Amino acid sequence: MEINKIGEVRSKYKEPVGPDEMRKTKSIIEVEAEYVDGLDQIEDYEYLQILFYFHKSEGYDLISKRRRGPERGLFTSRSPRRPTPIGITTVELLKREGNKLHVYGLDAIDGTPVIDIKPYASFMDQPTLSLQKKTPRYRINKLIKYQNQHDLLLKAGELHGHYCPYLALGVLAAADVLKRFGAENDGMEDLLAVVETNSCFSDGIQYTAGTTFGNNSLIYRDFGKTAVTFVKRGDSTKNLRYYFKDSDLIEREYPEAALKKL
């Protein structure tokens, strides 16, 4: 088996650090001269998949402790210590300058050999939709299960149109109640939400909890409070109210969000 190096990473990181930190920075991929023609029209793509070689990785353990959580098998982790130390990351393409690709989100250190570049295509690279066809909220429920609040907020922003503290509060409240109730809303009106404001907060509730006007599970009461009450239909023991008491906090710290609330 032969693997060819097609380029190299230029990064401010000379040694490995946490991948979460590295993904918040910009990097440059320098493609070798003999492969530059392969970059033709790459600017048409917003995201790229970068395959690279963990050149500083040594050895591996089939069972090891993860950064978060208990010990698990190697192939259930993203550890760079692997039998074939190859990494893959989806990055945002910022611009191309000749043989240089300026990217954002690459968790590879300076000097890392790049072995392939592919355009990211959602219709090919996302998991099969068979489960989502059966349960449209499949991915949302999975994000809640694994407490992935970051991606929940990003997806809620697609519905709402912008990101703000009130939207985040709605997402957090809805994710928390579903976790506490041990529920996965399947859109069959088993969960009821009573919101007391028509601010961005309510959209966070609707997206995350799946309680909407359309499925008869959202009630609006104009009490002017950033608050919501959840009720599990058919189980009177399951009801919770979330109320953001410090109503002036967001106005003080995020005045632009206060304007959006109006």
Image (cartoon, rainbow, N blue to C red):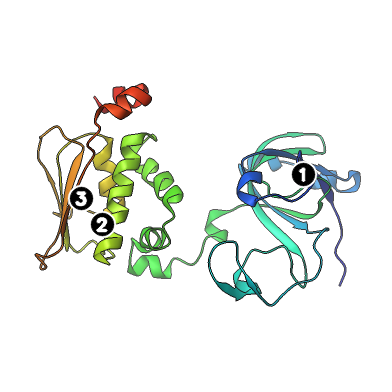
Q: Nearer the viewer, residue 100 or 225?
A: 225
**Residue located 76% across and 38% down the image:** 12
Q: In x, y percent, where is residue 262?
A: 24, 24
Q: Which class describes the residues within 10 Å of circle 3: few (<14), some (14-19), or many (20+)?
A: some
**Residue at the location (74% across, 69% down)?**
82
Residue that mark 3 sits on: 212
Under tag 3, what secondary structure?
Answer: loop
Badge number at residue 148: none
Q: Nearer the viewer, residue 87 or 147?
A: 147
* Mark with earlier residue (3, 2): 2
Q: Identity of the amino acid at label 3? A: Thr
Can you say whether 135 is above or below 242 in the image? Answer: below
Q: Residue 79: horizontal and vertical position, in percent? A: 67, 64
Left or right? Give the position of 258 relative to 103. left
The reply to whether residue 213 is visible in this rendering is no
Q: Residue at x 38, y 63 (%)?
A: 145
Q: Secondary structure at mark 1?
A: helix
Task: Please state if 212 lies on the left or on the right of 20 as rendered.
Answer: left
N-terminal of the pair, mark 3 or mark 1, is 1
The residue labelled by disc 2 is 177
Per the image, label 2 sits on a secondary structure element best described as: helix
Q: Which residue is mark 1?
A: 39
Q: Amino acid at mark 1?
A: Leu
